[in-house]
Image (spheres, helix red, strand yellow):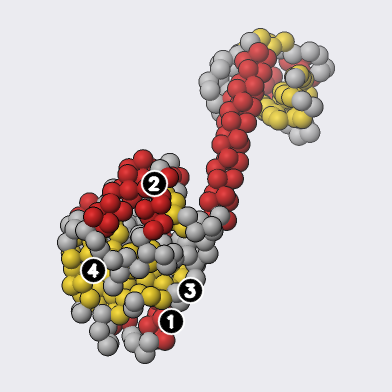
């Protein structure tokens, strides 16, 4: 580590100036320049005392360190040595601190990126068009949503995808010979943006979510996960028209849908059981090898609570003798082995 300081007359003959460069590990990482109009300068007496340099340097020295420069006009013009006090050690320690903080930050970024890559690449791939018992998975980018046929001419959606133009949803409606007015209900597993984007396209639909999730859905509350807490809180213009309760059965068209709370990924995360298909949203994932996994903790409010919620859900379904044919997840492919993957998860945990 080293530093150098030298005065120089700037190229513009109308000015005199000082230039301080700081070298570290052979690289120039900062340079301070102070230009003084030559005419004004002649009228000023040196030594020049600079109490703060915030207004002449960049943010690297904005911590407000004070220093002094002693120089005479003749010295400046003849490039003699400028005496400086106090600044060298201060800047050097600030550089060291910045380096350490930079390395820590870089390490955190690399670790997060690695975790995300592992999480995304180890998932079972979403199968667009996977269908079981009238529940059809529609892929929308890296997320999926479900169509549920509730009678001949109407459908319900479980979640509304990441695309606010609703291209994938409209294409599926078109495939069925239906328009957007055919969507009678949208049940939201939770309020993260990648699950609610197209809700407002369907003005005929009732919008349903657990009561504990309404603020997040409508854009009045922030996420609390390690990453989601940094997302801005923005009104979504979505209005939840029916707040759901844990355990209730909602009849939509001819289809009863059972509602289960699974808090953890978000405070009001829900799972929905329709025709024996359990739709878990982001509360769980399927690994490539077919194992059920917890929600990704980076995007979850409370990973421990998510885990216990999943175990409790498995126990409830098992104890009540409710038939489950398949498990469906938002970011990974469905598991058609009934409740078994959830029960095995509980045994492993
Ligand atoms: Zn989510």
Disc marking residue 128: 3
Q: Element under label 1?
A: helix
Disc marking residue 171: 1
Q: Is residue 206 left or right of residue 100?
A: left
Residue at position x 39%, y 58% in the image = 340
Q: How far apart are marks 3 and 4 (CA)?
A: 22 Å
Whether residues under marks 2 and 3 lie with C-beta atoms below 8 angstroms apart, the answer is: no
Residue at position x 54%, y 58% in the image = 288
Coordinates of residue 23 in the picture (x, y in percent): 75, 24
The residue furthest bottom is 177
Q: Distance between the residues labelled 2 and 3?
A: 30 Å
- Give whichever of 114, 280 is nearer the camera: 280
Residue 143 visible (yes or no):
no
- Give whichever of 249, 143 is nearer the camera: 249
* Residue assigned mark 4: 257
Whether residues under marks 2 and 1 lie with C-beta atoms below 8 angstroms apart, the answer is: no
Coordinates of residue 159 in the picture (x, y in percent): 34, 66
Which of discs 1 and 4 lies nearer the camera? The answer is: 4
* Residue assigned mark 2: 347
């Amino acid at each position: 580590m080293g530093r150098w300081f030298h005065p120089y007359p700037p190229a513009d003959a109308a000015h005199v100036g000082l230039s301080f460069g700081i070298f570290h590990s052979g690289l120039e990482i900062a340079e301070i320049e102070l230009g003084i109009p030559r005419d004004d300068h002649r009228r000023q007496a040196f030594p020049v005392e600079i109490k703060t340099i915030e207004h002449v340097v960049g943010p690297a020295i904005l911590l407000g360190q004070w220093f002094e420069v002693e120089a005479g006009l003749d010295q400046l013009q003849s490039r003699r040595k400028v005496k400086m006090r106090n600044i060298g050690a201060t800047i050097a320690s600030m550089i060291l601190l910045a380096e350490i903080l930079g390395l820590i930050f870089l390490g955190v970024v690399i670790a997060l990126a690695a975790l995300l890559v592992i999480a995304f690449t180890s998932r079972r791939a979403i199968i667009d068009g996977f269908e079981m018992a009238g529940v059809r998975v529609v892929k929308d980018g890296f997320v999926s949503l479900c169509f549920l046929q509730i009678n001949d001419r109407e459908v319900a959606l479980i979640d509304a995808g990441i695309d606010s133009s609703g291209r994938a949803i409209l294409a599926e409606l078109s495939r069925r010979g239906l328009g957007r007015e055919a969507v009678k209900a949208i049940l939201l597993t939770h309020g993260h943006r990648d699950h609610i984007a197209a809700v407002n396209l369907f003005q005929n639909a009732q919008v349903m979510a657990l009561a504990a999730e309404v603020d997040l859905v409508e854009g009045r509350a922030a996420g609390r996960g390690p990453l989601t807490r940094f997302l801005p809180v923005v009104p979504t213009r979505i209005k939840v028209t029916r707040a759901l309760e844990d355990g209730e059965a909602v009849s939509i068209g001819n289809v009863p849908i059972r509602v289960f709370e699974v808090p953890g990924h978000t405070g009001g995360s829900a799972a929905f059981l329709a025709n024996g298909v359990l739709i878990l949203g982001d509360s769980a994932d399927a690994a490539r090898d077919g194992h059920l996994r917890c929600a990704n903790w980076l995007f979850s409010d409370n990973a421990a609570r998510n885990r216990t919620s999943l175990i409790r859900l498995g126990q409830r379904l098992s104890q009540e003798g409710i038939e489950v044919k398949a498990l469906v997840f938002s970011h990974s492919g469905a598991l058609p082995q009934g409740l078994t993957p959830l029960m095995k998860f509980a045994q492993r945990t």
